[in-house]
Image (cartoon, rainbow, N blue to C red):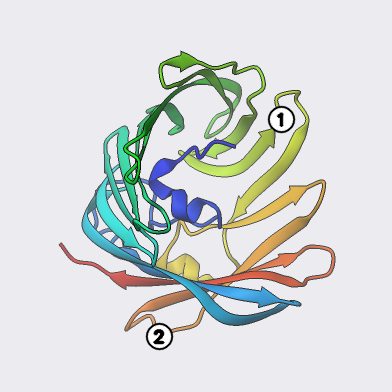
Amino acid sequence: MFKQIGAIALVAIIGFSFAACSDGDDIDSSNRNWRISKLTLYTVANGVARSVYGEIKYNWIHYTSDTNYEYESTSTTRIYHYTRNGQTSVSTRKGTASEYPTTYTERTTYDSVSGLPLNQIKINKFTNTGVTNTTKISYTIQLLSDSGAVKIYKHYVNAYIENNVSQDVSTQPYYEYKIKNKKTLEEKYFRSDGVLNFTYTYTYPDDVGIRAILPDYMLRSSSSSTRNSYQKAQIISDPEKELVIRNREFVSHNNVLIQQYDITYKKIYY
């Protein structure tokens, strides 16, 4: 499966919006200066959150809108650097020489109407061998339904070139996105034969405090042939000092906890 939004690759897997707002340009309106500063991941065993197993820290260098920003994130094994300028984003990832001896760069161009990726260039250089792999991907965005503010798009690969060699795209999966004002409400992932593999649905949290501070914060529920799950979120800190939101994911049929992470936000002034 392709990582479709390279600039938020770290957080895409857990289904939350890393920025407080998704439209507009002024950081002083709608609490736009709340920025994620840390992501804390927990081990979960037998439905119980145990110990912290990972932490990612964020350093915001620049932010004026969700299409104009720059930040870095670091973990114990990797350093990421992200920039977004209009309809183009660039992300780089550097790993430690011993465990992850690579430097990875991804450049993505987005469609101005849907907000979905149009083109990607991915360069992966192995620092221990000097070998470089380059992948170029082009996407087609097809409007399937238009109900005014809500639109459904089909998003699929139309060209895949690896190290200057064109690859067969007939076996590639594709996505369908339900989008309202460039915010994803639903994401469906299909196999190349058209069989639906999973569905993600994004909704606002029940916690009124979260909605008041981060009006665009959303949770993700998932549905697949193997498992259905949903997320819950709550504030576990004093927002006057810093905002910490605990996200927990549960199996739908028995409400067993399967994932937990804390997202720490701080007010950033530029």
Q: Residues within 10 Å of mark 2 (few under 14, many from 20)?
A: few
**Residue hosting label 1:** 191
Tell me the kind of residue under disc 1: Arg
How much space separates mark 2 and mark 1, taking CA atoms?
Answer: 44 Å
Q: Which corner quadrant of the image does residue 252 belong to?
A: bottom right
Rendered-image quadrant of the N terminus: top right
Residue 28 visible in this rendered orientation of the protein: no
Of residues 201 and 170, which is closer to you in this image? Answer: 170
Q: Tell me which residue sits at (43%, 34%) in the image.
A: 115
- Please, is residue 11 above or below residue 128 in the view? below
Residue that mark 2 sits on: 238
Please say whether residue 244 is visible from this viewpoint.
yes
Mark 2 or mark 1, whichever is nearer to me:
1
Residue at horizontal 34 percent and vertical 46 percent from the top? 128
Judged from the image, the secondary structure of the residue bearing numbered disc 1 is loop
The number of numbered discs placed on residues in the rendered structure image is: 2
Of label 2 and label 1, which has the lower sequence position? 1
210 sits to left or right of 102: right
Residue 30, quarter of picture: bottom left
Residue 214 position, x and y percent, is: 42, 64
Q: Is residue 258 left or right of residue 91?
A: right
Image position, residue 244 (x, y; %): 44, 76
Q: Residue at x 62, y 32 (%)?
A: 175
Task: Pinpoint residue 216: horizontal percent, then vertical percent.
Answer: 46, 56
Nearest the eye: 42 or 124: 124
Specify the amino acid type for callout 2: Asp
